[in-house]
Each structure stands twice: as C-alpha cells, then as structure tokens.
Amino acid sequence: MTAAQRLRRAAHGDRGGDGGSAIIEFVFVAVIVMVPLVYLIVAVAAVQRTQLAVSQAAREAGRAFATSSGPAEAQVRVAAAVRLALAAQGLPNDAVVRYVPSGSGCSAPAITPRVAPGAQFAVCVTRHATLPAVPSVLAGRGVTAVGRYVVHVDDYRVVTS
C-alpha cells in the first residue's frame, strides 16, 4: 500500500475492515444480559404476587371469621374470602387454610377456632407458587408462600348462635 493510499484511508476514517462490528457485539451482549434479567424480574413478580395474595387472604379470612355469627357461617365466609383474595391477584383457589394458636407459627398443630367473645387464634393461608418456565422436575414444589393473621374476637361481642 502506498503512502497516498494510507493518507486517503486515514482521511476517510477507514481503519480496515472493522466497520459495524461494535453494534453486533453490543446487541449480542445485550441479549446475553437482558434475557436472564427479564426472566428474574418475571420470576420474582410471580412469587411476590403469590405472597401478596396469601397475606391478603389470611387477613380477609380472619376478619370474615371474626364477624360471622356462628361456626358454620364462619367457614363459608372464610372460603369465600380466600377465593376472592386469590382471584384478585389472578391465582387459582388452591390455598390451604389452617387455624393455629395465636402465639405459635403456622407449622403448629391445627386447632378448631371458636366464634366467642375474647377468642384469639391465627389464620394461616399457605400456597405453593411455581416458577414460570421451570419444569416441575427441576423446581420441585416451587416456593411456599404463607400468610398469617391473628384474629381477636371482640370481648363485648354478642354471638347469636
């Protein structure tokens, strides 16, 4: 290559065959970084949605139980409250509702709650959230979300049944 050709190439900014490769490298690296990042955001959102739903379901179930007039009505109202709380987050009605003593965790033995003045117990709602696009063989049962709400029936409440 002559000196005149080198001067012409330098004046036009031609460095010799690398034109446009930075864009390809940027797109390649962006895809490698962005795909896992987007998946992580979707997976965390799915788990957070389930946690929010079970927390809301436990709170609403406890309130429904405490304001009912008897045990039969209480169970119907609790089931409806849990179903509505899960449906509000777009989840199926597959949560498990348990009642435990108020000072213990949700893994404690279940009790039979009463609708009586001064009664105290905790409502635990448990649901398994699956991770999106992960086969059940790899994910197992997924992530377990537990919502807990302590119910205190009013001390001066009059129970009709």
Image (cartoon, rainbow, N blue to C red):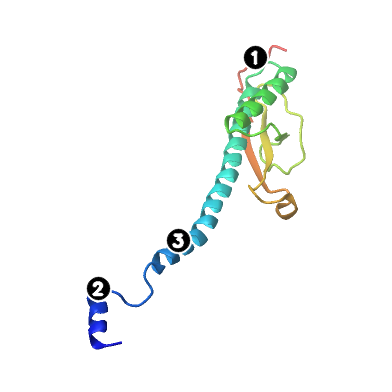
Viewer-closest of 28 and 67: 28
Expressed as whole percent of the image width and height from the top left, the position of residue 113 reads 73, 28
Residue 158 is tagged as 1
Residue at 24%, 73% in the rendered image: 12
- Name the element at disc 1: loop
Residue under pointer 2: 12
Residue under pointer 3: 27
Image quadrant of residue 73?
Answer: top right
Viewer-closest of 95 and 8: 8
**How far is the residue under mark 2 from the one under mark 1?**
92 Å
Tell me, yes or no, if residue 152 can be seen here.
Answer: no
Residue at 62%, 36% in the rendered image: 54
Residue at 69%, 25% in the rendered image: 79
Q: Earlier in the sequence, mark 3 or mark 2?
A: 2
Mark closer to the observer (3, 2):
2
Image quadrant of residue 148?
Answer: top right
